[in-house]
């Protein structure tokens, strides 16, 4: 049974209710089988008591044989019901955890960032550990019900022998759960704090991995390590606190369960001594007193797991219910592939205005790196349309009116520091496996020498973040990925800063040839790329100050010549 993902739970409790609702079928079967398992476990000491009672009266081998057969049936029922019941519940648990992992990952990877005060490493922790702990509720509820069934059967069986025994079990169980429910609240609050600190430690690790190369470059790795150690120490201390609280909880539960079992055993012994119950009933009572410790232990642990699941669900709700930074439109671009920037003001940009016609190759020579970064951020939708002044139009429609997915289909802005993923050269160039221009993209980006170096070719393994590639190889791989996407409108920012001059010339020609007739904007100071552009826009002090071909600007603009010649 599933629930459509269009339903968006707003709280941790809502997430738990959603998880329970769409697994009600699996939980019903699991509860039935686990209840049968607990009933069989309870029936075992009852059967032993009846066998003793019956054997002492009749002393018949036939009766003994039937009793052994009955025990075999009980044992088989216990074994099979446990096996298939746990299989159903664990499958549902694993599937539900997967659903929430995908849901949280989808929220974190949405094109429009969400307004949530969590770093990427913290979101990763929410999508893994918290999703798993939330899905545990699928197993907790059936086990809770089946444990209750076992305790009730034991209470009824003891009550039939003597009402005082049954009443003792019921009163003792209520008292134990009342004490433990109070203690479980402390576990919930401690667990929430531990999860938050572990998530912060995970975020710190993610930041350090991303910045490992520059940290080594200026010798900052030791200071970064000390910073992580402080965060990790906080997480360790909180984990110790949670372990201490859990230990006290488990110890208290075990002690209370043992006291109840001892009380039932002693009471049964006293009643047998007084002649109020038979020897067979005494055997049953002693067996049940030992047996009920297991379901009571399981029953008493359930509040703790419920609190942990709720704490994890509340952390997931932080991500899933966070509002987008901006509300995108729903329209789609018109048929044209032109790009227009109209009086955009943001950061270092002041009244930037230009238009790239459909099929045109335009370069922007930004004298200030900050202005180049701000322009790329605006075009990439990293800055919400309502956070900057002016308008950006794609195909004649304002970006603010367009659906983000529709913009992504038409406009691709290749980041300056494009990530390289663990996999192969091919999977990094064509992640979806649908591009028809991979060979041309490899050729245009001059990645051919990297492919030729390895006998696996495009199937050569790439380590996480391109650790087995040089800086220039990573940059060309990122460029090849952008070209293979074959977007209607492509924006590149400094795609050749890590390659030599000869390779840069070849890349410039290859990109211009491959993108012929396609709208292309390159933000660069590379003379080679500027030279192959149809025209060059000079971006200085936040505004476009000049516009012409590269060679004419070299001949007429001294400041431009000094800025771009190497």
Image (spheres, helix red, strand yellow):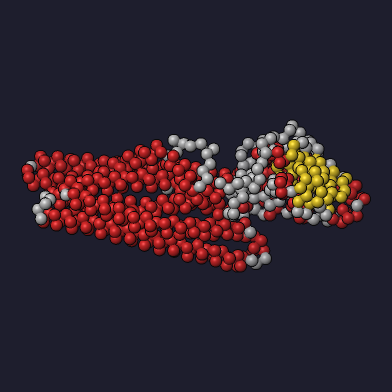
Query: Which residue occupies 21% across, 58% down?
Result: 263
One can see residue 521 in this view: no
Expressed as whole percent of the image width and height from the top left, the position of residue 15 reads: 48, 45
Residue lying at 52% horizontally and 60% vertically, measured from the top left: 197
Residue at 52% in and 57% down: 196
Look at the image and tell me in which quarter the C terminus lies: bottom right
Above/below status of 275 relative to 354: below
Work out whether residue 471 can be spotted. yes
Return the x and y of residue 299 as percentages of the image width and height.
Answer: 33, 51
| Residue 233 appears left or right of 356 | left
Image coords of residue 295 (percent x, y): 29, 50
In the image, 118: left or right of 470? left
Work out whether 389 lies above or below 518.
below
394 or 488, nearer to the observer: 394
> How many discs appear?
0
Task: Please name whichever residue, 321 or 347, is drawn nearer the observer in this view of the structure.
Answer: 321
Quadrant containing the N terminus in the rendered view: top left
Q: Nearer the viewer, residue 277 or 56?
A: 277
In this rendering, is residue 178 above or below 400? below
Residue drawn at x 88%, y 45% is: 548
Q: Which of the two residues, 197 or 412, is positioned nearer the viewer here?
A: 197
Query: For this view, does 49 lie left or right of residue 354?
Result: left
């Amino acid at each position: 049974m599933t629930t459509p993902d269009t339903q968006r739970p707003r709280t941790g409790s809502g997430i738990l209710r959603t998880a329970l609702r769409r697994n009600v079928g699996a939980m019903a079967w699991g509860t039935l089988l686990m209840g049968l398992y607990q009933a069989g476990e309870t029936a075992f000491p009852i059967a032993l008591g009846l066998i003793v009672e019956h054997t002492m009266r009749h002393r018949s081998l036939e009766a003994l044989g039937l009793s052994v057969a009955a025990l075999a049936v009980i044992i088989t029922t216990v074994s099979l019901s446990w096996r298939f019941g746990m299989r159903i519940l664990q499958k549902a648990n694993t599937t539900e955890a997967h659903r929430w992992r995908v849901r949280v990952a989808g929220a974190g990877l949405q094109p429009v960032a969400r307004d949530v005060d969590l770093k990427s490493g913290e979101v990763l922790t929410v999508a893994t550990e918290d999703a798993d702990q939330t899905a545990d509720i699928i197993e907790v509820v059936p086990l809770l019900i089946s444990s209750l069934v076992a305790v009730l059967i034991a209470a009824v069986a003891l009550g039939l022998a003597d009402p005082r025994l049954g009443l003792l079990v019921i009163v003792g169980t209520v008292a134990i759960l009342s004490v433990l429910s109070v203690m479980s609240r402390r576990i919930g609050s401690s667990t929430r704090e531990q999860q938050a600190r572990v998530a912060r430690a995970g975020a710190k690790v993610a930041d350090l991995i991303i910045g490992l190369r520059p940290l080594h470059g200026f010798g900052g790795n030791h200071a970064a390590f000390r910073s992580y150690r402080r965060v990790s120490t906080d997480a360790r201390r909180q984990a110790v606190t949670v372990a201490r609280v859990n230990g006290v909880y488990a110890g208290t539960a075990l002690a209370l369960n043992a006291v109840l079992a001892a009380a039932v055993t002693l009471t049964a012994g006293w009643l047998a001594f007084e002649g109020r119950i038979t020897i067979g009933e005494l055997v049953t009572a002693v067996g049940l007193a030992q047996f009920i410790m297991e379901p009571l232990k399981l029953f008493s642990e359930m509040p703790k797991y419920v609190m942990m699941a709720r704490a994890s669900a509340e952390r997931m709700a932080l991500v899933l219910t966070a509002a987008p930074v901006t509300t995108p439109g729903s329209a789609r671009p018109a048929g044209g592939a032109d790009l227009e920037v109209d009086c955009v003001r943001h950061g270092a940009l002041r009244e930037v205005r230009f238009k790239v016609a459909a099929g045109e190759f335009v370069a922007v020579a930004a004298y200030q790196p900050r202005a180049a970064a701000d322009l790329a951020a605006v075009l990439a939708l990293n800055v919400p349309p309502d956070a900057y002044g002016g308008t950006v139009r794609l195909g004649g429609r304002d970006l603010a009116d367009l659906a983000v997915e529709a913009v992504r289909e038409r406009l691709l802005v290749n980041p300056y520091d494009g990530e390289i993923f663990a996999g192969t050269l091919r999977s990094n160039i064509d992640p979806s496996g649908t591009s028809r221009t991979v060979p041309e993209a490899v050729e245009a980006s001059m990645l051919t020498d990297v492919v030729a170096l390895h006998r696996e070719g495009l199937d050569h393994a790439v380590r996480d973040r391109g650790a087995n590639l040089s800086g220039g190889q990573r940059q060309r791989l990122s460029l090849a990925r952008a070209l293979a996407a074959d977007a209607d409108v492509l924006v590149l920012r400094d795609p050749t800063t890590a390659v030599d001059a000869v390779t840069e010339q070849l890349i410039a020609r290859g990109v211009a040839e491959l993108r012929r007739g396609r709208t292309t904007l390159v933000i660069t100071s590379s003379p080679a790329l500027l030279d192959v552009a149809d025209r060059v826009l000079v971006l200085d002090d936040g505004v476009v100050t000049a516009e012409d071909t590269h060679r004419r600007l070299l001949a007429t603009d001294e400041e431009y010549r000094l800025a771009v010649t190497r």
